[in-house]
Amino acid sequence: MLQRIALEELEPSESFLQSRYWAELKRRFGWSACAVRALPSGERDAVFHDLHLAMTRRVAPGFTLAYVPHGPELRSPTEIAEGGALERELELITSLREFGQELASAIDTSVAMLRFDPPWELDIGAATGRLDEAEAAQAGAARDAARRSAARNAGLRAPGVEIQPRATVLIDVTQDEEALLAGMKSKWRYNLRLAAKRGVSVESAGPGLLSRWYALYRETAARDRIAIHSEQYYRAVFEVAAATPDGPEIELLLAYHEGELLAGIVVGYYRGRATYLYGAASNRKRNLMPAYALQWEAMQRAKAAGMRVYDLFGIPRTSSDRHRMQGLYRFKTGFGGRIVERPGCLDLPIQPLRYRAFRAVELARDTRARLRKRLR
């Protein structure tokens, strides 16, 4: 059984998306937060973590959406990655229906659908050992088909929506610097040396310089055709972290050349994992490779802070040259590490008719967004 508890009882977990920090941040922007505790009642509870955070939002009269970011977490978060077993992931998917029904009841009787975004990480392989694109696409399609089948059998839906990144690159920063550099592609090591030779410097800055970074971020969004939040949102990322006990440490790193701000990234440090959250770069002097210098500095800082992993937080699931974000895939995988893949969103319709109406609106909205990107 699941019992609702106060947010103050939510203890630190593996993911900052399952923390009081994330609850407080999203509450500033229209979401409500609900924390629950699992009471031991069988085998399922021995698999899933005891504490869970769900975010709720009323999206239409009589329709409340419940979203579980990076949840449910597993008691042993590495059991899928270490086993490399898709079969284990599929078993976990089949456990979600009963859990979701209990969770929806514990949250609110008005919940019409519950959307999970599990953090379960399946190890796909070395980032620099790029597979043949056709083989990789075929393997990815087979995994997705198996997930959809498991979801259907459990009364769930795999909507194909991506809220949190489904694939990412994880770099083991417990290695020494020589090993970290050796894991990169040779061109990436060359670019790091070039940035240093040309005088690019990286500095840690406080939120007082966030407006300058945000101006670069808007420039980046226009160039790369990505959606971003308001400056107020990113300022809250820092403010809430500073005010929340056991919250992540958020750091702004800025790259300069001869006093000119060229690029900047926001990095979060939380329970052994440093995460590259947001990145911005000017259209000027890109040949000086400030983005490479920033990532290398972030890895070194993560190592010095005692982190185990540096998470590049999101890559396309394909390396295809036809993918509009192929450049992002190439950039992040060039730093080495391992590629991991997550199941993606899984929906549990509580009120099927209202769920179908919601999905129709969601699909229409996503279609319009993709069309606007093509027309830009």
Image (spheres, rainbow, N blue to C red):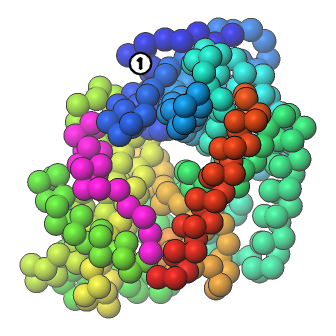
Q: Is residue 240 magenta?
A: yes
Amino acid carrying mark 1 in the image? Leu
Q: Which residue is tagged 1?
A: 7
What's the residue at 44%, 21% (across, down)?
11
Which quadrant of the view contains residue 45? top right
**How many labels sit on residues?**
1
Q: Position of residue 188 (x, y in %)?
A: 45, 81
Image: magenta residue range: 225-241
Q: Is residue 93 above or below residue 308?
A: above
Q: Residue furthest front?
A: 61
Q: Position of residue 179 (x, y in %)?
A: 48, 66
What's the residue at 45%, 20% (across, down)?
10
What's the residue at 83%, 49% (across, down)?
148
Q: Where, quadrant-wise, is the N terminus in this rendering?
A: top right
Q: Position of residue 69 (x, y in %)?
A: 55, 39
User: What element does badge 1 sit on?
Assistant: helix
Q: Is residue 367 above or below residue 158?
A: below
Q: Position of residue 166 (x, y in %)?
A: 62, 55
Q: Is residue 201 magenta?
A: no
Badge 1 crowding class, 10 Å Cα cut-off, few under 14, some 14 to 19, many 20 or more, is: some
Q: Nearer the viewer, residue 283 or 26?
A: 26
Viewer can see residue 87: yes
In the visual, does 121 lie left or right of 44?
left
Q: Nearer the viewer, residue 171 or 175?
A: 171
What's the residue at 10%, 83% (across, down)?
258
- The overriding secondary structure of the stretch rendered in magenta is helix
Viewer can see residue 38: no
In the visual, does 232 lie left or right of 276?
left
Q: Is residue 365 above or below residue 271?
A: below
Q: Nearer the viewer, residue 99 or 57?
A: 57
Which quadrant of the view contains residue 152? top right
